[in-house]
Amino acid sequence: MTTGTPAPFTAADYKARMDRAARSAADAGLAGVLVAPGPDLVWLTGYHVPADTERLTVLVLAAGREPTLVVPTLEAPDAAAAPGADAMTLRDWTDGTDPYGVTAPLLETTGRFGVSDNAWAMHLLGLQRTLPDSSYVSLTEALPMLRAVKDAAELERLAAAGAAADATYEEIRRVPFAGRRENEIARELAHLLRQFGHSQVDFTVVGSGPNGANPHHEASDRIIEEGDMVVLDFGGLRHGYGSDTTRTVHVGEPTAEEQRVHDVVREAQTAACEAVRPGIACQDVDRVARKVITDAGYGQYFIHRTGHGIGVTTHEPPYMIEGEEQPLVPGMCFSVEPGIYLPGRFGVRVEDIVTVTEDGGRRLNATARDMAIVG
């Protein structure tokens, strides 16, 4: 497992990201980008602020202009201590004054701006009232690839997160399953992720027996029984970057049908991972996995996309789904996670994080993909 603490990102790193975002916005025909608290702001500036704060905080980026972070006065000291603070100007506003009046002079009065998907509606409406001729589009729609291509330092963090998730799986497969509740196993997964260096646990799915046929089942008080298939899907953040892996285990020996379904999913996942290379469209990864499952007669039971991007969040663009024609480029990272879900019976999913290399793809998870037998 990758160990140690990576070197922190520098003000120069954050400046390069802000410059790239401003250039990308201009190339997309936008007057600029408005970044609210959340993952985009963390990635661009290193500034963590609660996304549920009701006071306006917004980073304004536009080509040819100094990046400016508008913040409440009482939070200005924290903003000034952010890792990317030296690469931007701070402009604060005090309670009782109009924050939109402070922000408006930074914007073109008739411009079209990209805005973070998680921006508060009241803040967006406040800007629209102040600048009635301005217009806005979500960043996911306007700049879907903004965070999609990772640099070497980001890839190092993602590899470390993947290694920690792998270590978690190797430990959890050794514990007793039969006679225990799903939420007990989920708590052990969360504990192990933290033990192996995660600062944040985002999900610990434990879907046993019929619960495994629900892809978004998390964990319940159902008692795991001998003969159950169990879907284990877990991940979170380590050094600010995500992990996400799924393995499907079986309590005792599987039936021939259970083994066949698992084999089909594993073959689909292998084929999709081997298809990854620069230049193919995201949808082609989905098509490869889906064809294997459809040809085996289970196409109607593969009910979700094949994958999603990962970085400072565990779900982000790009998405491996029909209709997504974005070509793969080196540095993209995403999950490959086909599954088969037989309602009322069981489900199977196998998932790795894959990064696009110059001549193919590289998995960031290395644990065995065969169905493990647990006790």
Image (cartoon, helix red, strand yellow):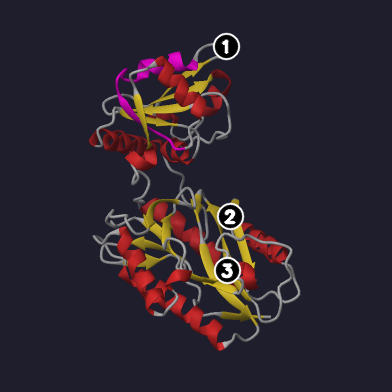
Q: Is residue 118 above or below residue 89?
A: below
Residue identified by numbered label 2: 198
Residue at x-position 50% and y-position 23%:
71
Q: Amino acid at mark 2?
A: His
- Closer to viewer: mark 3 or mark 1: 3
| Residue 185, horizontal then vertical, whole percent | 69, 66
Quarter of the rendering containing residue 49: top right
Residue designated by label 1: 96
Q: CA distance from mark 3 to mark 2?
A: 28 Å
Residue type, numbered disc 1: Gly
Q: Secondary structure at mark 2?
A: loop
First along the sequence among labels 3 and 1: 1
Q: Name the amino acid type tagged 3.
A: Ala
Residue assigned mark 3: 213
Residue name at image x 34 percent, y 26 percent = 135
Magenta span covers which residues?
99-117
Give the mark, 3 or 2, whose residue is nearer the N terminus: 2
Please tell me whether residue 110 belongs to the stretch shown in magenta: yes
Quarter that holds the C terminus: bottom right
